[in-house]
């Protein structure tokens, strides 16, 4: 049985290390309306003067209008996302594009000088945190008999 179409779409738009969450999108929303929302998010200064001093630098892109970028989705081969991307047509609605309810989309920016699309750039988050790396078990630790001549009072527990 094919999966039911989503009643509401939650779309994650990614570029570099930046993620934009567009939630509550109806299936009748056009790609052009999504681009308008992405442009609004890219041009807003919500992250300026963030408290996190280790925050990433913003990507070096100059976005002034919806024509400065395209929304695209990865072309899936054998169920896995490939390194090739398909540009979404602005006049199509989400249902016609075949986008899933939680599918990530990617930004492809235009070069201001030539007008050519630059390749998609994004960084996948690591699955393991640096702090959560498994530690090697200490050597020489284990159960062994207590040395002879010790009383229970001599043992610190």
Image (tube, rainbow, N blue to C red):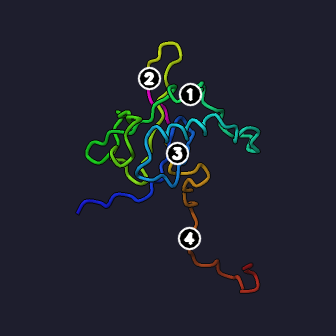
Q: Earlier in the sequence, mark 4 or mark 2?
A: 2
Give the image quarter of residue 73: top left
Density class for disc 3 (Cα within 10 Å; few <14, some 14-19, many ≥20) is few
Whether residue 50 sits left or right of residue 15 in the image: it is right
**Residue under circle 1?**
65
Residue located at (63% from left, 78% from top) = 146
Q: Nearer the viewer, mark 1 or mark 2?
A: 1
Q: Earlier in the sequence, mark 4 or mark 1?
A: 1
Q: Position of residue 137 (x, y in %)?
A: 55, 60
Give the image quarter of residue 87: top left
Q: Position of residue 81 (x, y in %)?
A: 35, 42
Which residue range is magenta in the image?
118-123
Q: Earlier in the sequence, mark 3 or mark 1?
A: 1
**Residue under circle 2?**
117
**Residue under circle 3?**
125
Q: Position of residue 108 (x, y in %)?
A: 46, 30
């Amino acid at each position: 049985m094919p999966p039911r179409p989503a009643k509401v779409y939650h779309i994650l738009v990614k570029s570099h290390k930046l993620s934009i969450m567009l939630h509550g999108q109806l299936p009748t929303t056009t790609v052009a309306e999504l681009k308008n929302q992405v442009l609004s998010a890219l041009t807003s200064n919500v992250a300026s003067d963030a408290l996190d001093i280790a925050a990433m630098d913003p990507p070096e892109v100059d976005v002034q209008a919806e024509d400065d970028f395209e929304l695209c989705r990865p072309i899936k081969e054998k169920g896995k996302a490939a390194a090739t991307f398909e540009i979404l047509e602005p006049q199509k609605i989400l249902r016609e594009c075949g986008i899933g309810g939680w599918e990530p989309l990617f930004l492809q920016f235009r070069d201001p000088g030539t007008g050519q699309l630059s390749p998609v750039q994004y960084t996948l988050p690591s699955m393991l945190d640096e702090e959560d790396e498994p530690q090697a078990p200490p050597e020489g630790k284990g159960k062994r008999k207590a040395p002879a001549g010790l009383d229970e009072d001599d043992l610190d527990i």
